[in-house]
Amino acid sequence: MLNNDKLWYRDAVFYELHVKGYYDSTNDGTGDFRGLSMKLDYLKDLGIDAIWLLPFYKSPLRDDGYDISDYYSIQPEYGTLDDFKNFIERAHSLGIRVIADLVLNHVSDQHEWFQESKSSRNSKKRNWFIWTDDPTRFSEARIIFVDSERSNWAYEPVTQQYYFHRFYSHQADLNYDNPEVREEIKNVVRFWLNIGLDGFRADAVPFLFKREGTNCENLPETHNFFKELRKMIDEEFPGTILLAEANEWPTETKKYFGNGDEFHMAFNFPLMPRIFVSLAKRDSFPIIDIIEQTKDIPENCDWCIFLRNHDELTLEMVTDEERDIMYKEYVKIPKMKLNIGIRRRLAPLLDNDRSTIELVNALIFSLPGTPIIYYGDEIGMGDNIYLGDRNGVRTPMQWSYDRNAGFSYADAEQLYSPVITNPNFSYESVNVEGESRISSSLLNWMKKIISVRKDYRELLGRGEVQFLNQRNKRVLVYIRKYHDQRMLCIFNLSRRHTYVELDLSEYKGLKPVEAFTKSYFPRIGDLPYFFTLHPRSFFWLNLTVPSFDDSMDFDGDE
Ligand code: BGC
């Protein structure tokens, strides 16, 4: 059963997945909703509270479903509407919420709205899209897919005009100045929330409205539309949420929270690359700086913090210097680059270094915000940069060392994508079944960190953050605080052994208890508190009031 806390998203753990890549129950080579339902127990056991489903609507799949041709039906290979309903019901019965992608900036050129619009300049739907004779309009709007598109306008020969598209040319942008479009998108939202979804991850939110003389991003009209949408869902579907995909500079990204009356959540795009920059520079400053800039958001809002997702690790909104650092540290061969970013999964990006993988997860599980895991990253799945576009990070989930990684019993050639066979990451060794049997596996470690986070649900979900000044910039130190609870978090970002001396006098008399093993540390006194740290290691220390004579003890529960 679902908890009925209105702020449930503030202390949840999210998980992003694509139904096509999760589990194939029909053996046709593509995952489906029945298969996904069969794997809900796994997600429950992992400790997941909410799933974000990548687009599953009808689509020619030229941008993996972000090119919708019918908002009201499901891509046939993924199952039926009933399968979807059963999946939602089963997820809810296990206490798991489900949000889905809402692709509202554009539709596929195969969508009947666009087909009708392009059929004649007088078509009823002409004004649902943005047409012009002059493709120099909106010239300040940047091109996103720079590796494949040269312009945001595409020529359409039947009516001899150009239409606007921010992404691929087969994804025509809807005209949000047209009230009919806005109404129809609200109907789409109503349709799926009525079926039982718990909210949406809204795709490409900054781009809805376009105005000459601007870069056509983050315009007040766009914010107003989302405020309207929010009002509608608050009134008609209380408890459901909107999560913004706005890959912008911190001040602009923050604005999507409005005054607590726009988005409930937004991905912390500014933080994500800075985590990797901090590691590359062995310097805590990029993280501290960005958290300071993204603090102070309305009480009923939260960041969603991620390390990797289904796209390239985008580097559009970082400085030139930061981008250079990222390419130098993480791009081993040019093929790893895509558009303005890096197409890699977490484990290969970090050279499969277990300590670093744990460290970055410990960061996103303890910095302010709600963590989200990209499917497969909990077992350390690899990628295949030779698959083109972003497909290399979207390969089938690796369940076991059986045929096709236990994902499907179709012929290997029939799979929507080959499984990962590179010996370093092959499904024969990196898979759920195998890792479940080894207590020291990444999967078991991920389960542990999720459960520890839940031990401190409110403190880590809702507490404020305060960075501690100290001299070793290789070490990041902060305290999370919530009422009388305190968690001291220490991270060695470098590849060397190091130490840190902390002035904890404010917490004199308290006793640090290590959050994973419940080991006791000496009571905080007047002297600086001293920690030695292994390369890429971290501590989470709960600062407790000692309740008995603790002069001799070393361990809590063994
Ligand atoms: C999605 C991409 C998609 C694009 C166009 C993005 O923000 O995450 O996967 O290609 O929107 O819809």
Image: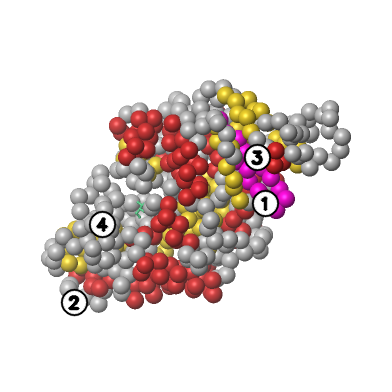
Disc nearer the start of the sequence (4/3) = 4
Quadrant including the N terminus: bottom right
Q: CA distance from mark 2 to mark 1?
A: 60 Å
Question: Which residue is label 4 attached to?
Answer: 141
The amino acid on which the numbered mark 2 sits, given as a three-letter code, is Asn
Question: Element at badge 4?
Answer: loop
Q: Residue at x 48, y 58 (%)?
A: 243
Side of 314 relative to 454 (left or right): left
Secondary structure type for disc 2: loop
Quadrant in which residue 311 is drawn: top left
Q: Label 4: how many residues lie within 10 Å, few (<14), some (14-19) or many (20+)?
A: some
Q: List the residue tagged with mark 1.
A: 482
How dense is the environment of label 2, judged by Cα within 10 Å: few (below 14), some, or many (20 and up)? few
Please state the extent of the stretch shown in magenta in the rendering: 478-493
Rendering coords of residue 109 (x, y %): 27, 61
Say which label, 1 or 4, has the lower sequence index: 4
Is the residue under label 1 in contact with that under label 3 (CB below 8 Å)? Answer: no
Residue in the image at 36% along x and 61% along y: 218
What secondary structure predominates along the stretch shown in magenta? strand
Q: Nearer the viewer, residue 23 or 242?
A: 242
Using the image, tell me which numbered label, if any, was put on residue 122: 2
Residue nearer the viewer, 274 or 507: 507
Determine the secondary structure under disc 3. strand
Q: Is residue 414 visible?
A: no
Q: N-terminal of the two: label 3 or label 2?
A: 2
Classed neighbour count for the residue bearing mark 3: other residues with Cα under 10 Å, few (<14), some (14–19), many (≥20): many
Which residue position is annotated with label 3?
488
Residue 155, quarter of picture:
bottom left
Q: Which is in the foreground here, disc 1 or disc 4?
A: 1
